[in-house]
Image (cartoon, rainbow, N blue to C red):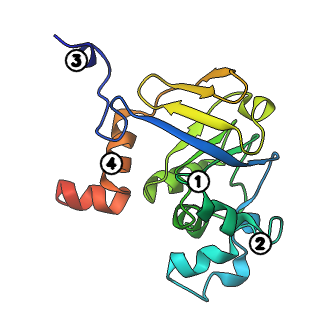
Amino acid sequence: MDNWNNKIHISKMTKGFFMRSKAIRVFPPDTNTDEIISGKYKYDELDMEKLAVHTFESIDKDFYEDSKREKNPMIVSARNFGCGSSREQAPQVLKACGISCIVAESFARIFYRNCFNVGLPAIECAKISEGVSKDDELEVDYGSGKIKNLTSGEEYEFKPIPRYMQEILDAGGLIPHLLKKGGF
């Protein structure tokens, strides 16, 4: 019997999956959804690829272009990332920017679930913002719940994503997951 059969179900996205990427930004506590994407754009554009050019524009004018320069960029944050409004546009524009994962000490709960609803992995990891700097190379092992900072050598542990949420990510978000399962 192979080692994978002795573990909690690991879906296709996470089974043996190591993501190696740069942390293109490390955000402070309480980064809110209006900083991610201003509410003034909420009715202007439905195409998230077009809306993404405004991501973090009020606090970081270079974010969009920097996110497009890296392969599978990641963002790291201190506590309470995504607080504020509950608009799904915030995680949608991050995904449209190419963000492959958000690692934060904690998330606003609605934002956290919206990330999974749109197919964007969100990982809660204590003290991650204290040991990661902009442009650090990180390796995330979704299956074992470990993050290694390849730049500094520091390692962190996180609670692996539950199976049902892995399945939502595998499908590309909640709606594709429900359609795959035959609806509600």
Mark 1 or mark 2: whose residue is earlier in sequence: 2
Dividing the picture into quadrants, the one containing residue 39 is bottom right
Name which of mark 1 and mark 3 comes first in the sequence. Answer: 3
- Picture disc at residue 170: 4
Residue position marked by numbered label 2 in the rendering:
57
CA gap between label 4 and label 1 equals 20 Å
Q: What amino acid does circle 4 point to?
A: Asp
**On screen, 10 above or below 6?**
below
Look at the numbered discs 1 and 3 and tell me whether their residues touch, using CB distance below 8 Å.
Answer: no
Report the Cα–Cα distance between label 1 and label 2.
22 Å
Q: Can you identify the residue that label 1 sits on?
A: 110
Q: Amino acid at mark 1?
A: Ile
**Residue type (three-letter) at the residue carrying disc 2:** Glu
Describe the element under mark 3 as helix, strand or loop.
helix
Real-space CA distance between mark 1 and mark 3, rounded to the nearest whole angstrom: 33 Å
Number of the label disc, if any, that sits on residue 5: 3
